[in-house]
Image: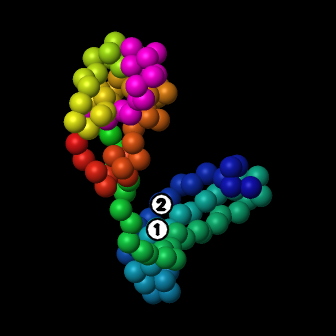
Amino acid sequence: MFKDMKTQCHLKPGQKGTRRLVEQYGTSLLCVRYRYDEVRGVRLKTVEIVVEEKPWQPPFRFRDGDIAPVKVEFGETELREKLRKARAKWDAQAKLWLVPYRLIRGTELEARIPEEFVNGSKKL
């Protein structure tokens, strides 16, 4: 139903066409949209409102320029060779390979980043 409709107007609270809805929904109102259905010949007025608000912390994400730690076991020689080719450095103290994230993004090595570094609870 909505895929055939065109949205022609996207209004913020307080703009003309939203005043009655601001009175009704108050600060919960985020926006008002007017959608037009040419097939049925109708206009729909829709509202977007806040129904819940709670604290949230965005997950830590590596950027391309960051150095990412990668855990590879001693016997996994093929993966160690891939890391060497990607210019990774071995950190003997942490027992992790350190490699630019852009070189492992989307590869099997990305899944080898220890969870404590992914969720941001531990930093290099």
The local secondary structure at tag 2 comes to strand
User: Which is nearer the eye, 84 or 3?
Assistant: 84
- Residue 10 is tagged as 2
- Horizontally, residue 83 falls left or right of residue 124, namely right
Q: Type of residue at label 2? A: His
Question: For the magenta stretch, what is the residue range?
Answer: 64-81
Q: Nearer the viewer, mark 1 or mark 2?
A: 1
Q: Residue at x 46, y 15 (%)?
A: 78
Q: What residue is shown with label 1?
A: 31
Q: Residue at x 38, y 34 (%)?
A: 71
Q: Is residue 67 magenta?
A: yes
User: Which is nearer the eye, 48 or 111?
Assistant: 111
Classify mark 2: residues with Cα within 10 Å, few (<14), some (14-19) or many (20+). Answer: few
- Horizontally, residue 83 falls left or right of residue 21, namely left
Mark 1 vs mark 2, CA separation in Å: 7 Å
In which image quadrant can residue 85 be found? top left
- Give the image location of residue 43, x and y in percent: 65, 64
- Horizontally, residue 71 falls left or right of residue 4, namely left
Q: Is residue 82 magenta?
A: no
- In the figure, 55 relative to 115: above or below? below
- Give the image location of residue 119, x and y in percent: 37, 52
- In the figure, 76 relative to 55: above or below? above
- Horizontally, residue 15 falls left or right of residue 48, namely left
- In the figure, 47 relative to 82: above or below? below
Classify mark 1: residues with Cα within 10 Å, few (<14), some (14-19) or many (20+). Answer: some
Which of disc 2 and disc 1 is earlier in sequence? Answer: 2
Q: Is residue 100 visible?
A: no
Q: Quadrant of the N terminus?
A: bottom right
Q: Residue at x 61, y 59 (%)?
A: 35
- Give the image location of residue 17, x and y in percent: 47, 73
- Give the image location of residue 22, x and y in percent: 44, 81
- Residue 68 is tagged as none
